[in-house]
């Protein structure tokens, strides 16, 4: 019975991870579609000032950090298993 519970927890955790990965790839796809449109509009109607860099770099930075969070690297010290370790620690108290 406990094995079923553990398997169910692993399944739910894996499902959540797959959803986060899918979200990142959706974000990346939209970025790859929209940024060329922004570049085209900028160069077509206002070629003397390249303002598209603000959008590309700003959004790209957000996309970069989104990727870091999804694929397991977190700058604040909350690694992959931090949440689970913290739950176990608090349950012992």
Image (tube, rainbow, N blue to C red):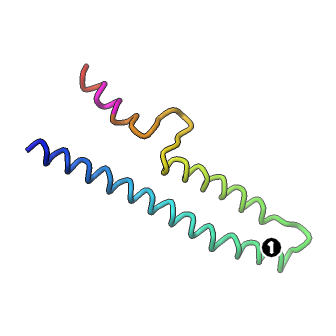
Q: Position of residue 77 (x, y in %)?
A: 51, 32
Q: Is residue 66 magenta?
A: no
Q: Position of residue 43 (x, y in %)?
A: 83, 75
**Closer to the camera in the image, 66 or 5:** 5
Q: Position of residue 90 (x, y in %)?
A: 29, 25
Q: Residue at x 35, y 54 (%)?
A: 16
Q: Residue at x 39, y 37 (%)?
A: 81
Q: Which residue is mark 1?
A: 42
Q: Position of residue 34 (x, y in %)?
A: 65, 72
Q: From the viewer's perspective, is residue 88 above or below residue 36? A: above
Q: From the viewer's perspective, is residue 93 above or below residue 83? A: above
**Closer to the camera in the image, 37 or 74:** 74
Q: Helix or strand or loop: what does disc 1 sit on?
A: helix
Q: From the viewer's perspective, is residue 76 above or below residue 90? A: below
Q: Residue at x 52, y 43 (%)?
A: 73
- Left or right of 16, for residue 40: right
Outermost residue on the right side: it is 48
Q: Residue at x 71, y 74 (%)?
A: 36
The span shown in magenta is 85-89
Q: From the viewer's perspective, is residue 88 above or below residue 81? A: above
Quadrant of image for the C terminus: top left
Outermost residue on the bottom side: it is 44
**Closer to the camera in the image, 44 or 88:** 88
């Amino acid at each position: 019975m406990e094995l079923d519970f553990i398997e169910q927890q692993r399944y739910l955790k894996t499902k959540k991870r797959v959803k986060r990965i899918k979200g990142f790839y959706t974000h990346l796809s939209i970025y790859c579609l929209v940024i060329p449109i922004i570049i085209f509009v900028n160069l077509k109607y206002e070629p003397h000032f390249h303002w598209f860099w603000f959008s590309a770099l700003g959004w790209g930075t957000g996309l970069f950090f989104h990727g870091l969070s999804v694929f397991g690297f977190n700058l604040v010290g909350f690694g992959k298993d931090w949440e689970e370790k913290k739950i176990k620690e608090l349950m012992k108290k």
